Image (cartoon, helix red, strand yellow):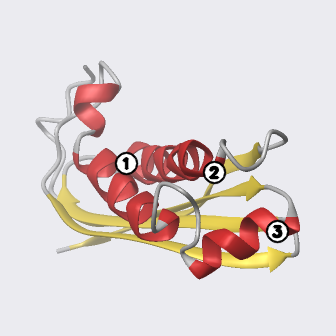
Amino acid sequence: MVDVGDKPPMRREATAEGFFCAAVTTLDKVEAGDVPKGEAIAVARIAGILAAKRCDDLIPLCHPLPLDRVRVDFQRIEPQRLRVEATVSTTAKTGVEMEALTAVSIAALTLWDMTKAVDKNLRIEGIRLVSKSKTAV
């Protein structure tokens, strides 16, 4: 791991996004909570939050961080595209980019798992860091 011992704690926030792509009828079912496995959005939100909290267990050289907030949101931006966004914040010596990216990735994968029985042409696209910031505390 990188030595961050001499860095001062700062308020840090990162936002990441990705896109879950599926048939119009599939996303209609997702939004209605009507897929065979249940409430896909609710399950994906919890999965994303848990993934951010466990990022250091999933990615070998990530520092364990005390997270202050994890927010995972979903927005249908096109008939066949659902935007998955995660914002993570902490007060620590290193940033939360990996936690935000992991939250988006796992939330999108959870949507895939929840809908694969009704749609064979699913895609996950464009996972990226949208913003990050740090301010002195």
Give the amino acid type for the residue marked by disc 3 in the picture: Thr
Report x, y in % for residue 109.
55, 43
The residue wearing badge 2 is 115
Q: Is residue 107 left or right of residue 18?
A: left
Query: For the N terminus, which image quadrant?
Result: top left
Of the residues under marks 1 and 2, which one precedes in the sequence? 1
Per the rendering, the mark at residue 123 is none
Please name the residue shown 68% across and 71% down the image: 29
Q: Is residue 88 left or right of residue 78?
A: left
SS for callout 2:
helix
The mark lying in front, picked from 1 and 2, is 2
Please say if the residues under marks 1 and 2 sit with CB atoms less than 8 Å apart: no
Please name the residue shown 30% across and 18% down the image: 60
Q: Nearer the viewer, residue 62 or 72?
A: 72
Separation of residues labelled 1 and 3 (CA atoms): 31 Å
Please name the residue shown 17% across and 47% down the image: 65
Separation of residues labelled 1 and 2 (CA atoms): 24 Å
Q: Nearer the viewer, residue 83 or 135?
A: 83
Please name the residue shown 58% across and 50% down the image: 108
The residue wearing badge 3 is 25
Give the amino acid type for the residue marked by disc 1 in the picture: Glu
Separation of residues labelled 2 and 3 (CA atoms): 11 Å
* Residue 80 picture quarter: bottom right
SS for callout 3:
helix
* Residue 62 picture quarter: top left
The residue wearing badge 1 is 99
Question: How would you rate the neighbour count of disc 3 (Cα within 10 Å): few for under 14, some for 14-19, many for 20 or more?
Answer: few
The mark lying in front, picked from 1 and 3, is 3
Question: How would you rate the neighbour count of disc 1 (Cα within 10 Å): few for under 14, some for 14-19, many for 20 or more?
Answer: many
Give the amino acid type for the residue marked by disc 2 in the picture: Thr
